[in-house]
Image (cartoon, helix red, strand yellow):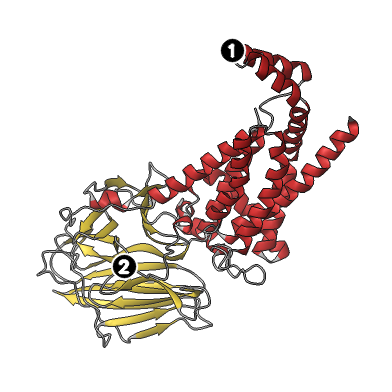
């Protein structure tokens, strides 16, 4: 097979990937009815004077809790900035006029204070202060808020630990009434589906977007995405499970409710509210609390960056929420290797360069076979042209003669294809890794490259990549006799340069180094081949 076909295949696969990537990130919404699951979903407005709200901080996260229901209406990640060169912390949860993203929890059922039938009002909790912060010498911060009704004391406690993004939520129910109580605990995440314009946290570059939507894990399913499209189309979840979690995901960050494992079944559900808000949550099994007794219900809430090693300790399979796409089985080991190299050199850019050298060393035997095959094909070009001239009107005979020639000269016509097919999944897995690993967010390299996960702001790297690709093409196109095909091959570096303008700088850096190594390998292989001849 002629070498130019390799580049046509690569270009076709690459362009197809771009089209697919852009298509899958689109959301087409429809208006549907609301499924409430007997949970009060009323949205309380944000008051300018912050009445009925408290703030809870540890060293990595700041929470704003609405005392109506005790829902977390805002969450800021203190160690992450909302955008490059900004002094503002990243706000992951928020409640604004044009966008809502909240972590809600409560007690529902016949005796639950959050029951939707309680005059459409959430219980108003009380606390001893409005600001709570973890001190340097404290191992944990416990913030209780209380609601009392009919001789029943409901205490909701937020437990934060230093350096941790997982928050323990505990309900203590002291039943001093004469009645037996029956209730359920629920935890749910609620988010506006359609993003307003100019949200700093979300990239507008289609090539840098990852999955944004709901996900869950259950006893039977380790990890499954559940798109906002399905929720908006009223394809609601209703799953019974003894373990698992529910989450909402976006690039680099995630929020997840992790209920206690139960002997009985939790219920995972979704709902669609007010034609533009998606909800995913869980409901615990029925909890019976006899008169003059106490019960404690626990749950965990993760609000933070998608750090795989930390998430894996919080809940089984929670680390799978890091979105490496369909090539996760390649991206995960590549990320582990990249992290290992980063621990040695201390710079993610140099780690990418080192991992490029490693990949090129591993694939060198295939590269050598490719260029030796190219060189032999170039030598056979006069004989191939003669076969085309003699049997051009008989395609079958021409193919037979060419195969006979290849066999006689011990040339594999497919020898130039395999490196391309090997390179493509490595390239794509690195792409998924760069746009999906929070460790690479805002990671600087050198000079003007301040964020390897974002595009080059001055487009220098894509242009350099195009130049290196042109040098490779200039050598490879010597095998092409057809003038039209040769002209098309010269345009390929330009087409790829345009595509790479929007791609992560780290990926373009990988491709530049890969091309430079290929050029050196190409010269050495062809020199040794001519020397042997």
Q: Quadrant of residue 407?
A: top right
Residue matched to label 2: 196
Task: Give SS at disc 1.
Answer: loop
Marks 2 and 1, how far apart at CA = 62 Å
Residue that appears at 25% across and 53% down: 29
**Where is mark 1, residue-wise?**
394
Image coordinates for residue 109, horizontal then vertical, percent: 17, 59
| Above or below for 130 versus 367 | below
Residue 446 is left or right of residue 124, and the answer is: right
Question: Decide: marks 2, 1 in contact (CB < 8 A)?
Answer: no
Q: Is residue 316 visible?
A: no
| Residue sitting nearer the eye, 112 or 14 | 14
Q: Secondary structure at mark 2?
A: loop
Q: Residues within 10 Å of mark 1 (few under 14, many from 20)?
A: few
Residue 475 figure quarter? top right
Badge 2: few (under 14), some or many (20 or more) residues near its Cα, within 10 Å?
few
Residue sitting at x 13%, y 65%: 179
């Amino acid at each position: 097979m002629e070498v130019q076909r390799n580049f046509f295949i690569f270009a076709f696969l690459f362009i197809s990937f771009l089209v697919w990537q852009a298509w899958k990130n689109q959301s087409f919404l429809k208006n549907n009815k609301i499924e409430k699951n007997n949970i009060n979903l009323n949205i309380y407005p944000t008051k300018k004077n912050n009445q009925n709200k408290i703030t809870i901080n540890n060293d990595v996260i700041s929470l704003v809790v609405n005392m109506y229901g005790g829902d977390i209406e805002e969450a800021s990640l203190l160690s992450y900035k909302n955008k490059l060169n900004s002094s503002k912390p990243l706000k992951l949860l928020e409640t604004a006029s044009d966008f809502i993203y909240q972590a809600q929890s409560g007690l529902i059922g016949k005796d639950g204070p959050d029951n939707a039938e309680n005059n459409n009002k959430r219980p108003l909790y009380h606390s001893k202060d409005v600001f709570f912060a973890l001190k340097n010498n404290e191992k944990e911060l416990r913030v209780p808020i209380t609601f009392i009704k009919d001789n029943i004391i409901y205490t909701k406690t937020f437990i934060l630990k230093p350096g941790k993004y997982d928050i323990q939520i505990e309900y203590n129910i002291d039943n001093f009434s004469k009645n037996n109580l029956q209730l359920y605990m629920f935890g749910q995440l609620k988010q506006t589906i359609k993003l307003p314009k100019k949200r700093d946290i979300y990239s507008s570059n289609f090539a840098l977007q990852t999955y944004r939507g709901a996900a869950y894990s259950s006893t039977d399913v380790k990890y499954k995405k559940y798109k906002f499209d399905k929720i908006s189309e009223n394809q609601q979840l209703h799953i019974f499970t003894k373990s698992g979690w529910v989450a909402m995901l976006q690039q680099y960050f995630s929020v997840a409710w992790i209920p206690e494992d139960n002997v009985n079944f939790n219920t995972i559900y979704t709902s669609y509210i007010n034609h533009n808000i998606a909800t995913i949550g869980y409901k615990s099994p029925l909890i019976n609390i006899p008169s003059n007794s106490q019960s404690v219900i626990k749950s965990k809430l993760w609000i933070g960056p998608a750090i795989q090693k930390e998430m894996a300790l919080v809940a089984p399979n929670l680390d799978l929420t890091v979105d490496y796409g369909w090539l996760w089985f390649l991206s995960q080991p590549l990320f582990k290797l990249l992290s290992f190299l980063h621990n040695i050199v201390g710079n993610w850019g140099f780690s990418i360069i080192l991992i490029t050298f490693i990949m090129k060393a591993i694939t060198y035997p295939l590269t050598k076979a490719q260029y030796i095959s190219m060189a032999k094909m170039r030598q056979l070009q006069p004989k191939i042209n003669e076969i085309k001239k003699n049997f051009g009107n008989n395609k079958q005979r021409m193919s037979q003669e060419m195969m006979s020639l290849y066999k006689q000269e011990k040339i594999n016509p497919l020898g130039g294809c395999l490196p391309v097919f090997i390179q493509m999944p490595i390239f794509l897995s690195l792409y998924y890794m760069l746009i999906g690993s929070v460790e690479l967010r805002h990671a600087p390299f050198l000079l003007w490259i301040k964020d390897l996960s974002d595009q080059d702001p001055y487009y220098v790297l894509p242009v350099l990549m195009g130049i290196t690709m042109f040098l490779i093409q200039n050598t490879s196109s010597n095998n092409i006799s057809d003038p039209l095909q040769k002209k098309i091959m010269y345009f390929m570096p330009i087409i790829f340069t345009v595509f790479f303008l929007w791609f992560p700088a780290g990926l373009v850096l990988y491709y530049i180094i890969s091309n430079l190594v290929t050029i050196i390998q190409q010269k050495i292989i062809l020199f040794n081949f001519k020397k042997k001849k």
